[in-house]
């Protein structure tokens, strides 16, 4: 539970980072992320793989959607495109969750994945990359939050 608390703090503290590299869900990186994580589109598969839900948070730039974090993957020293540390889902209105983005987090850096650099976030120092591979984001495919995403 202590690791999950740390994971929650990492995700929620990450909301303070603004902006993102302008890209869209049609980029080769987004396509690669979708392909590598297709199995996680079903939240029951994510739960079976060890992901746990944490509270959603809204920020100035929008929401980050409902987070599921894998505390085991948070220990990975090197990011792996098929092992995201966080999954972002939205409720599609009928109680089902739809995968909209993934996030990669590491304490080592600077680092990049598929040529896309991670952002350095402070308190605690860590590097994070969010990929909005399933939901278009007007702030960019690698932005921290999405004004069109919802926590509800």
Image (cartoon, grey):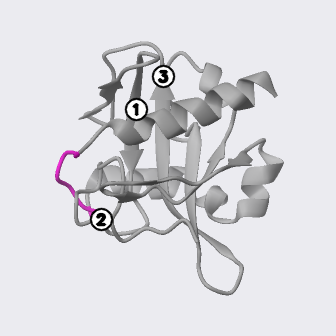
* Residue most extreme to the bottom: 94
Q: Is residue 89 left or right of residue 63?
A: right
Question: Principal SS element in the magenta part?
Answer: loop
Name which of mark 3 and mark 1 comes first in the sequence. Answer: 3
Q: Earlier in the sequence, mark 1 or mark 2?
A: 1
Can residue 138 be seen in the rendering of this structure? yes
Is 17 displayed left or right of 57 in the figure? Answer: left
Q: Which residue is mark 2?
A: 137
Q: Which residue is mark 1?
A: 128
Give SS at disc 3: strand
Q: Residue at x 19, y 45 (%)?
A: 21
Whole-angstrom CA distance, mark 3 to mark 1, is: 7 Å
Q: Is residue 133 magenta?
A: no
Residue 72 in sight: no
Asked if residue 47 lies left or right of residue 132, the reply is right
Q: Residues within 10 Å of mark 2 (few under 14, many from 20)?
A: many
Which residues, given as a range, are shown in magenta? Answer: 19-26
Q: Residue at x 48, y 30 (%)?
A: 105
Q: Which residue is mark 3?
A: 106
**Residue 25 is one of the magenta-drawn residues:** yes
Q: Secondary structure at mark 1?
A: strand
């Amino acid at each position: 539970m202590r690791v999950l608390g740390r994971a929650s703090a990492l995700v929620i503290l990450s909301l303070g980072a603004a902006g993102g590299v302008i890209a869209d869900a049609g980029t080769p990186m987004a396509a690669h992320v979708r392909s590598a994580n297709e199995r996680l589109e079903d939240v029951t598969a994510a739960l079976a793989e060890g992901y746990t839900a944490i509270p959603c948070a809204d920020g100035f730039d929008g929401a980050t959607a409902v987070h599921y974090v894998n505390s085991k993957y948070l220990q990975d020293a090197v990011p792996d495109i098929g092992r995201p540390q966080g999954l972002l889902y939205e409720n599609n209105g009928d109680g089902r969750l739809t995968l909209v983005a993934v996030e990669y987090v590491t304490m080592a850096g600077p680092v990049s994945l598929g040529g896309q650099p991670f952002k350095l976030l402070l308190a605690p120092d860590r590097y994070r990359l969010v990929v909005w591979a399933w939901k278009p984001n007007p702030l960019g495919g690698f932005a921290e939050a999405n004004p069109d995403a919802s926590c509800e």
